[in-house]
Protein backbone atom coordinates (compact mmCIF):
# COMPACT_ATOMS: atom_id res chain seq x y z
CA UNK A 1 0.00 0.00 0.00
CA UNK A 2 1.38 3.40 -0.97
CA UNK A 3 1.71 5.89 1.86
CA UNK A 4 2.69 9.54 2.25
CA UNK A 5 5.72 11.06 3.90
CA UNK A 6 3.53 12.10 6.84
CA UNK A 7 2.46 8.48 7.32
CA UNK A 8 6.11 7.38 7.35
CA UNK A 9 6.73 9.84 10.16
CA UNK A 10 3.74 8.43 12.04
CA UNK A 11 5.04 4.84 11.80
CA UNK A 12 8.56 5.90 12.81
CA UNK A 13 7.04 7.63 15.83
CA UNK A 14 4.71 4.77 16.77
CA UNK A 15 7.24 1.94 16.47
CA UNK A 16 9.71 1.08 19.22
CA UNK A 17 11.79 -1.68 17.61
CA UNK A 18 13.10 -1.36 14.06
CA UNK A 19 15.10 -3.73 11.91
CA UNK A 20 16.58 -1.73 9.02
CA UNK A 21 17.85 -3.26 5.80
CA UNK A 22 18.76 -2.34 2.24
CA UNK A 23 19.65 -4.09 -0.98
CA UNK A 24 22.34 -6.72 -1.44
CA UNK A 25 25.40 -5.51 -3.37
CA UNK A 26 25.00 -2.42 -1.19
CA UNK A 27 26.11 1.03 -2.33
CA UNK A 28 26.57 4.37 -0.58
CA UNK A 29 22.86 5.15 -0.59
CA UNK A 30 21.84 1.72 0.73
CA UNK A 31 24.28 1.88 3.63
CA UNK A 32 24.10 5.65 4.17
CA UNK A 33 20.29 5.62 4.36
CA UNK A 34 20.35 2.69 6.77
CA UNK A 35 22.93 4.23 9.11
CA UNK A 36 21.34 7.68 9.01
CA UNK A 37 17.92 6.30 9.94
CA UNK A 38 19.40 4.05 12.63
CA UNK A 39 21.25 6.95 14.27
CA UNK A 40 18.10 9.07 14.20
CA UNK A 41 15.90 6.35 15.71
CA UNK A 42 18.42 5.60 18.46
CA UNK A 43 18.47 9.28 19.41
CA UNK A 44 14.72 9.01 19.81
CA UNK A 45 15.34 6.27 22.38
CA UNK A 46 14.25 3.45 20.10
CA UNK A 47 15.87 0.13 19.29
CA UNK A 48 17.25 0.04 15.74
CA UNK A 49 19.57 -2.53 14.13
CA UNK A 50 20.92 -2.65 10.56
CA UNK A 51 21.16 -6.04 8.86
CA UNK A 52 22.50 -6.37 5.32
CA UNK A 53 22.83 -9.78 3.71
CA UNK A 54 26.06 -9.18 1.77
CA UNK A 55 29.65 -8.02 2.03
CA UNK A 56 30.02 -4.28 2.61
CA UNK A 57 32.27 -1.98 0.54
CA UNK A 58 35.33 -1.10 2.61
CA UNK A 59 35.47 2.49 1.32
CA UNK A 60 32.22 3.22 3.23
CA UNK A 61 33.68 2.08 6.56
CA UNK A 62 34.42 5.64 7.73
CA UNK A 63 30.73 6.25 8.30
CA UNK A 64 29.62 6.35 11.94
CA UNK A 65 27.82 3.12 12.81
CA UNK A 66 29.35 1.09 9.97
CA UNK A 67 30.99 -1.48 12.25
CA UNK A 68 27.61 -2.26 13.83
CA UNK A 69 26.05 -3.49 10.57
CA UNK A 70 25.39 -7.22 10.77
CA UNK A 71 24.45 -10.14 8.59
CA UNK A 72 21.01 -11.66 9.33
CA UNK A 73 21.50 -14.26 12.07
CA UNK A 74 18.27 -16.23 11.69
CA UNK A 75 16.99 -15.22 15.15
CA UNK A 76 13.60 -13.54 15.54
CA UNK A 77 14.38 -9.96 16.54
CA UNK A 78 10.70 -9.17 17.07
CA UNK A 79 10.80 -5.70 15.51
CA UNK A 80 7.60 -3.71 15.08
CA UNK A 81 8.80 -2.70 11.62
CA UNK A 82 11.17 -4.10 9.05
CA UNK A 83 12.32 -0.94 7.26
CA UNK A 84 13.46 -1.70 3.70
CA UNK A 85 15.50 1.11 2.13
CA UNK A 86 16.60 1.83 -1.45
CA UNK A 87 15.02 -1.32 -2.97
CA UNK A 88 11.80 -3.31 -2.95
CA UNK A 89 11.60 -6.50 -0.88
CA UNK A 90 13.13 -8.68 -3.61
CA UNK A 91 16.76 -7.77 -3.01
CA UNK A 92 17.24 -8.05 0.76
CA UNK A 93 18.39 -11.67 1.06
CA UNK A 94 17.50 -13.53 4.25
CA UNK A 95 16.78 -10.47 6.41
CA UNK A 96 12.96 -11.00 6.52
CA UNK A 97 13.55 -14.28 8.39
CA UNK A 98 14.74 -12.16 11.34
CA UNK A 99 11.49 -10.18 11.40
CA UNK A 100 8.56 -12.61 11.14
CA UNK A 101 5.26 -10.81 11.63
CA UNK A 102 6.79 -7.33 11.43
CA UNK A 103 5.13 -4.78 9.16
CA UNK A 104 7.31 -3.89 6.19
CA UNK A 105 7.89 -0.15 5.81
CA UNK A 106 9.54 0.47 2.44
CA UNK A 107 11.18 3.80 1.52
CA UNK A 108 12.58 3.87 -2.00
CA UNK A 109 13.24 6.02 -5.06
CA UNK A 110 13.47 3.27 -7.73
CA UNK A 111 10.73 3.46 -10.37
CA UNK A 112 10.95 -0.32 -10.71
CA UNK A 113 9.74 -0.90 -7.10
CA UNK A 114 7.17 -3.72 -7.14
CA UNK A 115 4.95 -2.14 -4.46
CA UNK A 116 4.54 -5.36 -2.47
CA UNK A 117 5.55 -3.96 0.93
CA UNK A 118 2.83 -3.37 3.57
CA UNK A 119 3.62 0.35 3.40
CA UNK A 120 5.54 1.95 0.53
CA UNK A 121 6.71 5.53 0.38
CA UNK A 122 8.05 5.98 -3.16
CA UNK A 123 9.14 9.39 -4.46
CA UNK A 124 11.13 10.84 -7.33
CA UNK A 125 14.25 11.85 -5.46
CA UNK A 126 17.95 11.62 -6.22
CA UNK A 127 18.56 9.17 -3.39
CA UNK A 128 16.74 7.35 -0.61
CA UNK A 129 18.97 9.41 1.69
CA UNK A 130 17.39 12.57 0.25
CA UNK A 131 13.95 11.18 1.10
CA UNK A 132 15.11 10.42 4.63
CA UNK A 133 16.46 13.95 5.02
CA UNK A 134 13.01 15.33 4.20
CA UNK A 135 11.30 12.86 6.55
CA UNK A 136 13.64 13.58 9.45
CA UNK A 137 13.64 17.33 8.83
CA UNK A 138 9.83 17.36 9.02
CA UNK A 139 10.09 15.76 12.46
CA UNK A 140 12.40 18.52 13.65
CA UNK A 141 15.74 16.70 14.03
CA UNK A 142 18.88 18.84 14.27
CA UNK A 143 21.04 16.47 12.12
CA UNK A 144 23.97 15.51 14.33
CA UNK A 145 26.96 14.25 12.33
CA UNK A 146 26.10 10.58 12.88
CA UNK A 147 22.89 11.26 10.93
CA UNK A 148 24.26 13.89 8.54
CA UNK A 149 27.36 12.01 7.34
CA UNK A 150 25.56 8.85 6.17
CA UNK A 151 22.78 10.86 4.50
CA UNK A 152 25.33 13.05 2.70
CA UNK A 153 27.20 9.94 1.53
CA UNK A 154 23.95 8.46 0.18
CA UNK A 155 23.13 11.56 -1.83
CA UNK A 156 26.72 12.17 -3.00
CA UNK A 157 27.17 8.61 -4.26
CA UNK A 158 23.79 8.35 -6.01
CA UNK A 159 24.26 11.71 -7.76
CA UNK A 160 27.95 11.28 -8.63
CA UNK A 161 28.70 14.18 -6.30
CA UNK A 162 25.77 16.31 -7.48
CA UNK A 163 26.53 15.83 -11.20
CA UNK A 164 24.05 13.26 -12.60
CA UNK A 165 20.69 14.13 -14.13
CA UNK A 166 18.89 13.13 -10.91
CA UNK A 167 20.42 16.18 -9.18
CA UNK A 168 17.63 18.71 -8.56
CA UNK A 169 17.36 22.05 -6.80
CA UNK A 170 16.09 20.09 -3.79
CA UNK A 171 19.20 17.87 -3.87
CA UNK A 172 21.40 20.95 -3.76
CA UNK A 173 19.35 22.49 -0.94
CA UNK A 174 19.64 19.29 1.10
CA UNK A 175 23.38 19.21 0.39
CA UNK A 176 23.61 22.82 1.54
CA UNK A 177 21.75 22.06 4.77
CA UNK A 178 24.12 19.17 5.47
CA UNK A 179 27.11 21.46 4.91
CA UNK A 180 25.59 23.86 7.43
CA UNK A 181 25.59 21.17 10.11
CA UNK A 182 29.25 20.37 9.56
CA UNK A 183 29.73 18.12 6.52
CA UNK A 184 33.00 18.74 4.68
CA UNK A 185 32.52 17.61 1.07
CA UNK A 186 36.24 17.47 0.28
CA UNK A 187 36.94 15.15 3.23
CA UNK A 188 34.07 12.86 2.27
CA UNK A 189 34.92 12.70 -1.43
CA UNK A 190 38.54 11.86 -0.61
CA UNK A 191 37.44 9.00 1.62
CA UNK A 192 34.88 7.69 -0.87
CA UNK A 193 37.26 7.80 -3.82
CA UNK A 194 40.16 5.99 -2.16
CA UNK A 195 41.05 2.86 -4.11
CA UNK A 196 43.60 0.13 -3.56
CA UNK A 197 46.41 0.02 -6.12
CA UNK A 198 45.07 -3.29 -7.48
CA UNK A 199 41.78 -1.61 -8.38
CA UNK A 200 43.44 1.35 -10.13
CA UNK A 201 45.61 -1.07 -12.12
CA UNK A 202 42.55 -3.25 -12.65
CA UNK A 203 40.84 -0.38 -14.46
CA UNK A 204 43.48 -0.64 -17.17
CA UNK A 205 43.01 -4.40 -17.43
CA UNK A 206 39.22 -3.98 -17.54
CA UNK A 207 39.54 -1.52 -20.42
CA UNK A 208 41.30 -4.25 -22.41
CA UNK A 209 37.91 -5.99 -22.56
CA UNK A 210 36.16 -2.92 -24.02
CA UNK A 211 33.97 -3.60 -27.03
CA UNK A 212 31.77 -1.22 -28.98
CA UNK A 213 28.50 -2.22 -30.61
CA UNK A 214 25.73 -0.54 -32.63
CA UNK A 215 28.12 1.79 -34.46
CA UNK A 216 29.77 2.88 -31.24
CA UNK A 217 26.55 3.75 -29.43
CA UNK A 218 26.83 0.84 -26.97
CA UNK A 219 30.03 0.19 -25.00
CA UNK A 220 30.68 -2.84 -22.83
CA UNK A 221 33.18 -4.21 -20.35
CA UNK A 222 33.15 -7.98 -19.76
CA UNK A 223 34.94 -9.20 -16.67
CA UNK A 224 35.87 -12.83 -16.05
CA UNK A 225 35.41 -14.32 -12.58
CA UNK A 226 39.16 -14.84 -12.02
CA UNK A 227 39.68 -11.12 -12.61
CA UNK A 228 36.67 -10.03 -10.55
CA UNK A 229 37.89 -12.19 -7.63
CA UNK A 230 41.11 -10.14 -7.48
CA UNK A 231 39.24 -6.81 -7.45
CA UNK A 232 37.99 -5.43 -4.16
CA UNK A 233 35.52 -3.30 -6.11
CA UNK A 234 34.56 -2.74 -9.74
CA UNK A 235 32.02 0.00 -8.94
CA UNK A 236 33.92 2.77 -10.71
CA UNK A 237 34.69 0.81 -13.88
CA UNK A 238 31.54 1.63 -15.83
CA UNK A 239 32.30 5.34 -15.46
CA UNK A 240 35.43 4.78 -17.55
CA UNK A 241 33.37 3.94 -20.65
CA UNK A 242 30.17 5.92 -20.04
CA UNK A 243 32.13 9.05 -21.07
CA UNK A 244 33.25 7.80 -24.50
CA UNK A 245 32.06 10.13 -27.27
CA UNK A 246 29.06 8.71 -29.10
CA UNK A 247 28.24 6.12 -26.42
CA UNK A 248 24.58 6.19 -25.35
CA UNK A 249 24.48 3.01 -23.30
CA UNK A 250 27.34 1.59 -21.26
CA UNK A 251 27.16 -1.91 -19.84
CA UNK A 252 29.42 -3.78 -17.46
CA UNK A 253 28.95 -7.51 -17.09
CA UNK A 254 30.97 -9.33 -14.45
CA UNK A 255 30.97 -13.01 -13.63
CA UNK A 256 30.63 -13.53 -9.87
CA UNK A 257 30.04 -17.29 -10.14
CA UNK A 258 30.57 -19.62 -13.06
CA UNK A 259 26.92 -19.26 -14.02
CA UNK A 260 26.04 -15.96 -12.39
CA UNK A 261 26.73 -12.48 -13.73
CA UNK A 262 26.03 -9.07 -12.29
CA UNK A 263 25.12 -6.43 -14.84
CA UNK A 264 25.28 -2.63 -14.55
CA UNK A 265 23.78 -0.43 -17.26
CA UNK A 266 24.06 3.36 -17.66
CA UNK A 267 22.47 5.55 -20.34
CA UNK A 268 22.30 9.15 -21.42
CA UNK A 269 18.50 9.10 -21.51
CA UNK A 270 17.29 5.77 -22.92
CA UNK A 271 15.19 3.94 -20.30
CA UNK A 272 17.49 1.16 -19.15
CA UNK A 273 15.36 0.41 -16.08
CA UNK A 274 12.79 -1.16 -18.43
CA UNK A 275 15.52 -3.30 -19.97
CA UNK A 276 16.83 -4.39 -16.57
CA UNK A 277 13.28 -5.27 -15.44
CA UNK A 278 12.94 -7.58 -18.47
CA UNK A 279 15.98 -9.44 -17.13
CA UNK A 280 14.65 -9.63 -13.57
CA UNK A 281 16.39 -6.51 -12.28
CA UNK A 282 15.49 -2.84 -12.06
CA UNK A 283 16.70 0.60 -11.17
CA UNK A 284 16.40 4.08 -12.56
CA UNK A 285 15.85 5.35 -16.11
CA UNK A 286 19.56 6.08 -16.64
CA UNK A 287 21.14 3.64 -14.18
CA UNK A 288 19.94 0.10 -13.71
CA UNK A 289 21.14 -3.43 -13.15
CA UNK A 290 20.27 -7.09 -12.97
CA UNK A 291 21.73 -10.48 -12.09
CA UNK A 292 21.71 -13.23 -14.71
CA UNK A 293 22.21 -16.91 -13.96
CA UNK A 294 24.36 -17.35 -17.06
CA UNK A 295 28.00 -17.62 -18.02
CA UNK A 296 29.74 -14.41 -19.02
CA UNK A 297 29.47 -15.33 -22.72
CA UNK A 298 25.76 -16.17 -22.41
CA UNK A 299 25.00 -12.97 -20.55
CA UNK A 300 26.81 -10.94 -23.18
CA UNK A 301 24.95 -12.73 -25.99
CA UNK A 302 21.61 -12.11 -24.23
CA UNK A 303 22.09 -8.44 -23.40
CA UNK A 304 24.09 -6.83 -26.18
CA UNK A 305 21.41 -7.31 -28.90
CA UNK A 306 18.73 -5.87 -26.60
CA UNK A 307 20.87 -2.81 -25.83
CA UNK A 308 21.74 -2.37 -29.53
CA UNK A 309 18.05 -2.58 -30.40
CA UNK A 310 17.25 0.06 -27.77
CA UNK A 311 19.71 2.58 -29.24
CA UNK A 312 18.54 1.74 -32.79
CA UNK A 313 15.01 2.86 -31.81
CA UNK A 314 16.38 6.28 -30.86
CA UNK A 315 16.93 8.83 -33.65
MN1 LIG B 1 19.60 4.88 -4.17
Image: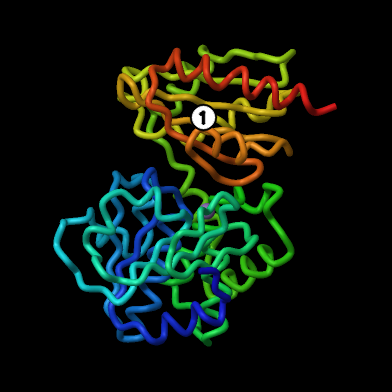
Q: Quadrant of the C terminus?
A: top right
Q: Is residue 82 above or below residue 27?
A: below
Q: Residue at x 35, y 71 (%)?
A: 103
Q: Assign a secondary structure to mark 1.
A: helix
Q: Quadrant of residue 118?
A: bottom left
Q: Is residue 243 above or below residue 288?
A: above
The foreground one among 23 and 28 is: 23
Q: Quadrant of residue 297?
A: top left
Q: Residue at x 29, y 44 (%)?
A: 55
Q: Residue furthest left?
A: 75
Q: Residue at x 73, y 39 (%)?
A: 269
Q: Residue furthest right?
A: 315
Q: Residue at x 53, y 53 (%)?
A: 113
**Residue 237 in the image, given as x and y percentages of width and height:** 51, 29
The foreground one among 189 and 214 is: 214
Assess disc 1: are there few (<14), some (14-19) or many (≥20) residues with their C-alpha within 10 Å of its C-alpha: some
Q: Quadrant of residue 100?
A: bottom left
How many numbered tags mark residues here?
1
**Residue 274 in the image, given as x and y percentages of width and height:** 62, 39
Can you tell me whether the CB of the residue at mark 1 lies under 8 Å from the nearest atom of ligand 1? no
**Residue 261 in the image, given as x and y percentages of width and height:** 40, 26
The foreground one among 105 and 249 is: 105
- The residue pinned by badge 1 equals 237
Q: Indicate left or right for 267 with 40 as reference.
A: right
**Residue 126 in the image, given as x and y percentages of width and height:** 62, 57
User: What is the basis of the colouring in this image?
Assistant: rainbow
Amino acid sequence: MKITMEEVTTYLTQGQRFLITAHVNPDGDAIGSSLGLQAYLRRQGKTAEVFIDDDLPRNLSFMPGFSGIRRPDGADWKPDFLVVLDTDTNRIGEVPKCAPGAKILNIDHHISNDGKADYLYLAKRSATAEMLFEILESSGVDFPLEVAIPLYVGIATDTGFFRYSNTTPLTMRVGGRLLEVGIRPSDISELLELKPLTVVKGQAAALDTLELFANGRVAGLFLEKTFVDQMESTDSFIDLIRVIEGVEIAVLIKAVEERRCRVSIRSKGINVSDIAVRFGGGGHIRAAGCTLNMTLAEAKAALVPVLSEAVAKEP
